[in-house]
């Protein structure tokens, strides 16, 4: 499954076998642990992202990996954004915004009425907070199995009320 992203980018469903994707996932996990206190990292590793309830998309410009994002189906009407990461050399190009738009569109296409996410609350996560707020997410209480009230920050979007796309870069 492949769809065109921003510019001449290709966004495709990913099987987590490409070495560049696995390296970006490793960077994502290492950064989560470096920037979060013990017990406050909920990022999924490759085995977690291969769960049938999770679909991963990657953005490419030719053979260059731009970034990744995943959608976890919590129930038939509720999805969760997971593993959003832009490749370091691709920051400030709007990669995250394009991938987030793809995840939102996919959640709507699946019939989700709500899309939520968990992220960190300190300075290294500020760009993510800005991206999610621009997209229409609002802060919310912990959801699902999350119970971290000290470090984690939670966001949600009511897809039944939210307008489509945002047009801003992330």
Image (spheres, grey):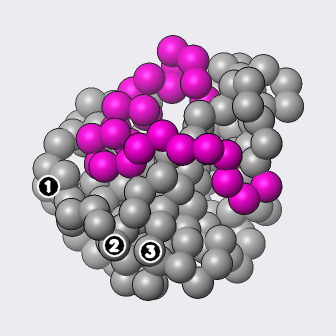
Residue 162 visible to the viewer: yes
Q: Is 67 placed left or right of 27 in the picture?
A: left
Q: Which residue is label 2 attached to?
A: 160
Quarter of the image for residue 152 reads top right
In the rendered structure, which disc, 1 or 3, sits on the residue that comes first in sequence?
A: 1
Quarter of the image for residue 34 reads top right
Tell me residue 59's x, y (percent).
37, 57
In the rendered view, would you say 158 is above or below 88? Answer: below
Camera-nearest residue between 153 and 4: 153
* Image quadrant occupied by the N terminus: bottom left
| Residue drawn where x is 29% and y is 75% of the image | 3
Q: Is 157 placed left or right of 161 in the picture?
A: right
Secondary structure state at the residue bearing disc 2: loop
In the rendered structure, which disc, 3 or 2, sits on the residue that comes first in sequence?
A: 3
Q: Which residue is label 3 attached to?
A: 113
Q: Which residue is label 1 attached to?
A: 7
Stretch of the chain drawn in magenta: 120-145
Tell me residue 136's x, y (percent).
31, 49
Residue 46 visible to the viewer: no
Using the numbered discs, state the Cα–Cα distance from disc 1 to disc 2 in whole angstroms: 28 Å
Camera-nearest residue between 1 and 114: 114
| Residue drawn where x is 74% and y is 72% of the image | 51
């Amino acid at each position: 499954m492949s769809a065109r992203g921003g510019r001449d980018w290709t966004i495709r469903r990913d099987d987590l076998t490409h070495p560049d994707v696995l390296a970006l996932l490793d960077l994502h996990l290492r950064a989560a642990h470096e920037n979060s206190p013990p017990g406050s990292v909920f990022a999924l590793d490759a085995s977690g992202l291969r769960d049938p309830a999770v679909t991963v998309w990657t953005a490419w410009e030719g053979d260059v990996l731009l970034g990744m994002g995943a959608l976890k189906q919590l129930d038939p009407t509720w999805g969760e954004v997971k593993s959003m990461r832009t490749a370091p050399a691709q920051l400030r190009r709007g990669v995250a915004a394009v991938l987030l738009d793809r995840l939102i569109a996919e959640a709507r296409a699946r019939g989700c009425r709500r899309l939520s996410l968990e992220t960190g609350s300190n300075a290294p996560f500020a760009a993510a907070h800005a991206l999610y707020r621009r997209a229409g997410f609002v802060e919310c209480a912990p959801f699902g199995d999350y119970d971290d009230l000290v470090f984690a920050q939670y966001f949600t979007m009511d897809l039944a009320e939210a307008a489509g796309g945002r047009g801003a870069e992330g």
